[in-house]
Amino acid sequence: MRPATLLRLALAGTRTDIARVVLTALSALLATVAGLTALTVLAIPTPAATDENQNRWSEQYHNALLAQPGLRGGTAIALLMLMIPVLALAGQCARLGAPARDRRLAALRLAGATPGQVTRLVVLETGVAALLGTLVGLGVYLVGRDLLHRPDAQGQLALPTDVLPSTGALAGVVLGLPVVAALAAALMLRTVTTSPLGVSRKAARERGPGPWAGLLIGFGVASFALIRPAVNSVDDTGGLAWLVPLLFAAGAFAAMIGVVIGTGWISYHCGRLLRRHARRAPALLAAGRLMADPWAGSRTFAALLAALIFGAGAAALRAQFAAQDQLDREQNLLAGVDERPDSFYLDTMDLVDAAVAVAILIAAGGLIVALVEGIVARRRAYAALVATGVPRATLSRSVAWQALAPAVPAILLALAVGTLLGRGLFPGAVRGESSTEICTGTDALCADPATRGQYIQFVRLPEVRRVPAVPLEHLAWLGAGALAAVLLTIGVGLLFLRASTALDELRTT
């Protein structure tokens, strides 16, 4: 098959196929913008140390997150974290309209195409859509860079619009994301067999998922708890510098995968509980569906759970900064110094909360796509139930049960794991042992150098440690936002349920 023919067939299809291509391109666009922004932050040059700038700050920026070299890495990581829900959204979009695509692939097999050719069609469709999105994303990044380049009266910038990542980094993002998307599509098709009679997949396991996700979560929490001792070891010997980023990356990845996989276990056992204790048809229908495909919850809620883990960890970090701020203020008062500590880190957490809110909104888009795709994929089964006399209201409540039953415990699990990761990384606020001098005389005596020395006293302050409070308020807001996203998803999905339960769907092939 010639490449031009392969490309034309890859871009052919119905309106659902066009919607899948557009949504995949949109996801690639968002991921490209986030990735290029993170690379731009890392590309900021660090000036040489001078007498006026011994800290090597990039003074062309008035934002300390960009000016201080030590804070740019964390800023870039926060931007890269936004790519996780975007990539999960891309994965959900790739499943949109799967039954219709399967019928189209079966027709191509009937026309003489080989199994390898139809697999390459799907891979090429995903890769071309992602490439289109990354190219548009590169254009949006370059245009936005020019539009946002607005120095203030002092010549300082709010954003790093004066630097560009290297050409290799730009090419790596623009060309690398489509390659990753194509490889992911090929990986998802590894269990798919396309024949002239249709598309078949390997049967799912009959037994429920095991509780192995708990081991991954425990490993992630333990890794974060070992980061601070590893940092102290690096300070003493300097030979374990590689261990800190390894523990951070491995722990975060293991905890995130553990929560996502654990959602499958939660879905299966929620289905068992509903089947054992439910007495009405909606809950029983949902129970059967949860037990038949427990991994649907993991696929559906993956992006939302990743955003919640990040948000809960940020809430624990905010609690740490608040405890440290309060402790420093109290110690300053004991020393007779009425000085308010710097609230830079607390103010920075507002930006992190904004990033978490954006991630939850993106994850909500993925939830909507996943739920609508599931309803459309099972429209013949729903139409058959309606034809046998099952009310549409019963099906609506069944869809709600199927989404909410695993969502609530999965949200609580993600919030708990994120909080434990943050607490493991920052176990408490510490104010080290210090001493300060105070003047016990009047203002006039203290201001006079001749008499000041007679009234000077040295106050020794012991080391103080304080455990931060659990950020229940922030966790509650995160949980409420996630639950609202799930409820919104259910509401949008039910709009498609009525059209998908029309009796004409029984005549589709």
Image (tube, helix red, strand yellow):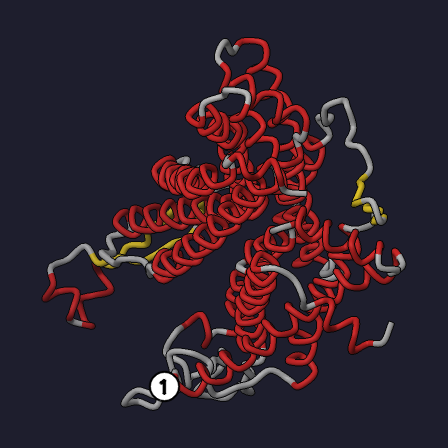
Q: Which quadrant: the N terminus?
A: bottom right
Q: Is residue 362 visible to us here?
A: yes
Q: Amino acid at mark 1?
A: Gln
Q: Which quadrant: the C terminus?
A: top right
- In the displayed structure, 260 sits above or below 208; it is below
Could you say whether the residue bearing mark 1 is in a helix, strand or loop?
A: loop
In the image, taking residue 318 as reference, residue 241 lies left or right, namely: right
Depth order, front residue of 255/360: 360
Q: What residue sits 61% from the left and 59% below the top?
A: 14
Depth order, front residue of 314/345: 314
Q: Is residue 471 visible to us here?
A: no
In the image, taking residue 223 as reference, residue 318 lies left or right, namely: left
Q: What residue sits 46% from the left and 81% below the top?
A: 160
Please give the residue where the numbered disc 1 appears in the rendered image.
156
In the image, taking residue 27 as reference, residue 492 lies left or right, namely: left
- In the displayed structure, 407 sits above or below 191; it is above
Examine the image and state in which quarter residue 201 appears: top right
